[in-house]
Image: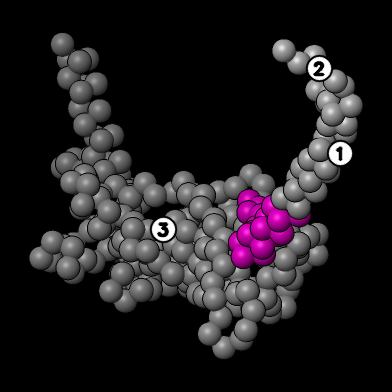
Amino acid sequence: MAMGRVAAAGAVLVALVVLGAPPGAGAELSEVFQYMVKRECRFINGTEKVRFLVRYFYNRMEELRFDSDLGQYVWFTHHGEIQARSWSRDREWMQYIRTAVDWCCRYYYTQNLIPVCPRSLPVPPSVSISLVPSSSQPGPGRLLCSVMDFYPAHIQVRWFQGQQELSEHVVATDVVANGDWTYQLLVLLETPAQRGLSYTCQVEHVSLEQPLRQHWEMPPDAARSKMLTGIGGFVLGLVFLALGLGFYVGTSGSPSPKTPGKRGCESRQFPKF
């Protein structure tokens, strides 16, 4: 019985040490180490005003935090300053953490879930190509590559004509956040599309095992196709007309083998009654 109480007391003491609670009277502990990270989503009037905090504690003392209202880290100790400056130099990480207020707090609020912020898996983009008219320059139009609904934000988009990369005359928008932690990007090829050539929009993203390639070729001219169809039908009609006339002339020029000619009927004398 005594051994069980000693074991229970030892378990409680270990739990207090791990949690950082002060030991009870008579217990002698030289040092207590505790490291804790707290993620908080604070909502005001639904999702109208949302604040995301990541707070880092060591031995129950807050050393630094990330505050979405400020968009940066704030430190309270010397060690926290060293860590905050190191993380702030990582641009990709800062872009990631600054959007957490959307993909973590607002998303899980709308899903009625506890915001534990597990958004770590990349999301592959959807890619499409469209022909957009140009108001300033004549021609068939310009090609627009739409890259939608991907995560994280870092992405590379390139245009190709056949196997040749088109590095010039390419205009891209900034990577735009959709508001649901995903992003979109539009890349315009300013040179006019030419008939008979193949164009490719190639997208490289961390979510893709290999580059995603979307191909496009200009469809045939509808008016020209109709004109060629009409000319072909007209020529085909003339051929059938010529064959018909030739057949008619050939059959009308020779007498039928079962019907005697007019001269034969006149030369024959029939008996009179």
Amino acid type, label 1: Gly
> Is residue 218 highlighted in magenta?
yes
Quarter of the picture containing the N terminus is: top left
Number of other residues with Cα within 10 Å of mark 1, as a class: few under 14, some 14 to 19, many 20 or more: few
Q: Which residue, as the protein is rendered here, is positioned at the far left? A: 45
x and y percent of residue 126 in the render? 51, 53
Q: Is residue 208 above or below residue 49?
A: above
x and y percent of residue 135 in the render? 53, 85
Amino acid type, label 3: Thr
User: Residue 253's mark?
Assistant: 1
Q: Is residue 83 visible?
A: no
User: Residue 182's mark?
Assistant: 3
Determine whether the residue tagged by mark 1 lies in a helix, strand or loop.
loop
Work out whether residue 24 or residue 217 is closer to the camera in this orientation and state it.
217
Nearer to us: label 1 or label 2: 2
Mark 1 touches mark 3? (CB < 8 Å):
no
* Residue lying at 25% horizontally and 28% vertically, measured from the top left: 11
User: Residue 270's mark?
Assistant: 2
Amino acid type, label 2: Phe
The magenta-colored residue range is 212-236
Q: Is residue 268 visible?
A: yes
- Mark 1 and mark 2: Cα distance apart in space: 29 Å
* Residue lying at 63% horizontally and 74% vertically, measured from the top left: 140
* Residue lying at 21% horizontally and 66% vertically, measured from the top left: 50
